Structure formats: C-alpha cells, structure tokens
Amino acid sequence: MKKICSLMMLGLLLVLAACGGDSSSNAGGSEKKVLEFWHIDPGEKEKIYEEAVERFEEKNPDVDVKVLRIPNDAYKQKLSVAMSGGNPPDVFHSWGGGWLKQFVDQDKVMDVTEDIEPSKFNELALANGTFDDKVYGLPLGLSIDVVFYNKEIFEKYGLEEPETYEEWLTIIDTLNENEIIPIALANKTKWPGAYYLMNFASRIAGPELFDSAFNREGKGFDDEAYVQAGEYIQEMVKKDAFNEGFNGVPYDEGTGRQLLYSGQAAMMDMTISFLNNVRSEAPDFEEKLDFFVFPKVEGGQGDQTHVGAATGPVWSAAKNTEHPELAKELMKELTSEETARNYTDRTGSLTAVSGVVPTDDFTSQFYDVVEQATHLQMPYDQTLPPELAELHKDTTQAIFGLDMTPEEAAKQMEEKAQEELE
C-alpha cells in the first residue's frame, strides 16, 4: 500500500512540475528569467512601452517581461506597499524628485550611474532622478506647463499674449466684461492650482527661492515671495479670473476642459498633456488653440525662460532585483532613441532623450520653449517629501478658496519643512 501511495505521489508531483513550468519556460524546456515591469500610462503610451518590451525580449529570448499597468491614482500606494513588503517590481515608473528619493533613502532603488551616458538625456530632466551625484532614474517623458488660450476669442476682443501679470489682469477684466470666463480651473485634485503658486514664486524671486527653501540654505517657505505669490492668486480669485466652484471641479473628468472647448472660457494653465486631451476629446478645437508661457511679474527676479516642468515616466529599478543587468537593459530600451521617437511622434509629448526633435508642428513649439529654458522647475509635490508635498497642495487650495491667508499658508509650510527637511 505504501508503495502504491508513493507512486501516486510521484505521479502527482510530475504533473504539477509540468504544469508549473509551462508559462515561464522556453522551447528548450529551461526556465525563463522573469522581470516585472509596472507603469501607469494607458492608450498609445502603453503600446509604445509594450513595443519596447517586445524589442527587449527579442534581444533576450531567455527573458519574459510581465507588464502591469496600474491606474495613476492607485499606483503610488501599490508601489509603496510593494516596496515596504520587499517585493517591488524589477523596473517601475516614477517621477523622480522627492517621491523617488524616499525609496532611494530606504536603499531600495538601484544606482545606475556607471551604466548610462548622461549626455543622452536633457541635463535638467536627468537631475530630477539624481541624488548625491548618483543616478537612480532615467527620464523618458518631459512635460512643461503653459497657459493655453482660444485664439478666436483673443482675436475677437483684440487681445494679445500677455508678457506681464498686469497685462494678464487687463485681459481678465476685458473677458469678464464680455461674460467670458477668463481662466478655466479644475482644482479639486489641488495640483492644477499649485502651478500658479510655483510660477508666481519663481517670477517674483527667481528659481533659487525654492532651492533655498528645500535645501535649507537661507530663505524658507515663509519667505515674503511665497506670501506675495499667494496674494497674487487671491487677487485673481477676487477679480473673478476663474470659473465658479473651481475648487470642487475634478480635472480628470474633463469638465474644466469643456469650458474651453465650448468657448465659455478663454484660457487654462495646464501641462502640455492638454494637447492630447484636445486631440482625443475635441479635435476641431485644435485650430483655435495656442499658448503662452506664464507671464512675468514687474520688478521680479524671474523671467519666462524659467519654466514649470515635470519628468515622467522616469524608469527606475529595484535594488533587490534578481536580474540587475537585465533590469538595466530594459531601462535602456525604454529610453532608447526608437522608444523616444515613438513617444514624441505618436503622443504629442516631449521626451527627455536628447536629440529627438518632434516632427509634429504643435509639439515642436513646446520643444522650442524647453530648448530656450534656463531653468525647469519640477512640481513641488513631486520634489518635496510626501507629507510636506500634501501640505503644499492643501494650503495652496485653501489660498484659492480664500479660506487661508497667504501668511498662514507660508507659516504652516515652513513649520512642516523644519520637521521634514532639517
């Protein structure tokens, strides 16, 4: 009886072994190496990443890449849980900045400094994934924020692109007089309004202000320039620059964009992803679309070569990956010239890979702005530690809602910065 049981058990084990080896073995029967790759982008960007993965697998036939797309809102939490549990994906999407740095500080991200050629990337974009002179993230995408506007409305009322804040206020007054919402704002998720605080602060005191406050080198987040930036925001609110109820309007649902498409609103300060929204949601509107860089402030130290920007995706690898060399090779394929060319030409986006000039006429205008930029200011919420980043968004939204004075917001930010950054 024991002999029969032993034979049955042996047969069951053989069946299980055969089934288990099926999905990760090659034609020769040997086990394939597996890499997990996580990202957040749907649509055409997802197709481009999958094509890069296919090229990588063709070059490495003994490797199987498991691709997982996770919606943006859920991604950060899912990756944080995977990191803390010691089971992160081999290669993953990040934005660089403080969000990536928290994992670098936990010694959970691979240092790829020796494996890349820095000149291959936009220097300012690569710096956003570099900490203590070590590279932990390779940027594929680069975005900027600009003020989009309806050319038809501007022409109708004899308006020209403003170069100064005062000129912008005059435009706002003219549009209000003609019952047109000057600026569409969907600020429920807080980050769209944050661009105004960052831009105003940079225009008032120059890009050195944030660096000083972040690095604790003199000026803090309670600097007078931050207070003044909040005052400018509240002045715009009181001048009815924005649509009613803007702090309760979610951006992703597209309600704010519809105000532009329908001609109810004339402008929107937004990242260049707006162009993709136009092309998918209201393609006929593109012929009315143009943009300008955030205006200067009279007497300010900043200028229009200081541009709000963001990197993403930035590809990073887990330090504890079982296949470090393969993970680095996959990162390189995901930032190859072919991938970057596809990314730019097929999605209307900019890339941080050097030398890839957009062929699309509209996107090439964004490229020109980046080429002329002397500073790219990455979003505070991607650069600051997570708790301070959330406070930045909360206090800025409260400034817009007239629920908090700019002085109160600046004080809260500086007190939290002293806890988090010192």
Image (spheres, helix red, strand yellow):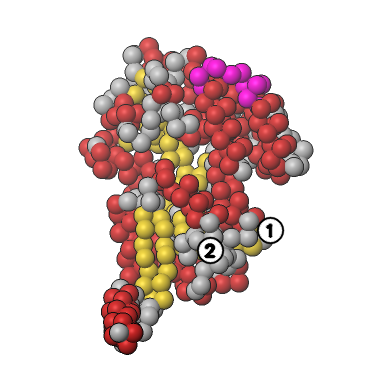
Q: Amino acid at mark 1?
A: Asp
Q: Amino acid at mark 2?
A: Ala
Q: Which residue is mark 1?
A: 132
Residue 331: x percent and y percent? 47, 66
Side (left or right) of 240 relative to 253: right
- Dot 1, how many residues are within 10 Å of its Cα: few (below 14), some (14-19), or many (20+)? few
The structure residue drawn at horizontal position 47% and vertical position 65%, both measured from the top left corner, is 90
The structure residue drawn at horizontal position 34% and vertical position 14%, both measured from the top left corner, is 178
Residue 309: x percent and y percent? 51, 44
- Dot 2, how many residues are within 10 Å of its Cα: few (below 14), some (14-19), or many (20+)? many
The structure residue drawn at horizontal position 44% and vertical position 15%, both measured from the top left corner, is 240
Question: Could you tell me which secondary element the residue under label 2 belongs to?
Answer: loop
Residue 252: x percent and y percent? 36, 36
Question: Could you tell me which secondary element the residue under label 1 belongs to?
Answer: loop
The structure residue drawn at horizontal position 55% and vertical position 69%, both measured from the top left corner, is 116
Residue 161 shows up from this direction: no
> Can you say which quadrant of the picture contains the N terminus?
bottom left
Residue 318 tag number: 2
- Could you say which quadrant of the image residue 47 lies in? bottom left
Residue 364 shows up from this direction: yes
Q: Earlier in the sequence, mark 1 or mark 2?
A: 1
What is the span of residues highlighted in magenta in the rendered image? 400-410
Side (left or right) of 66 relative to 117: left
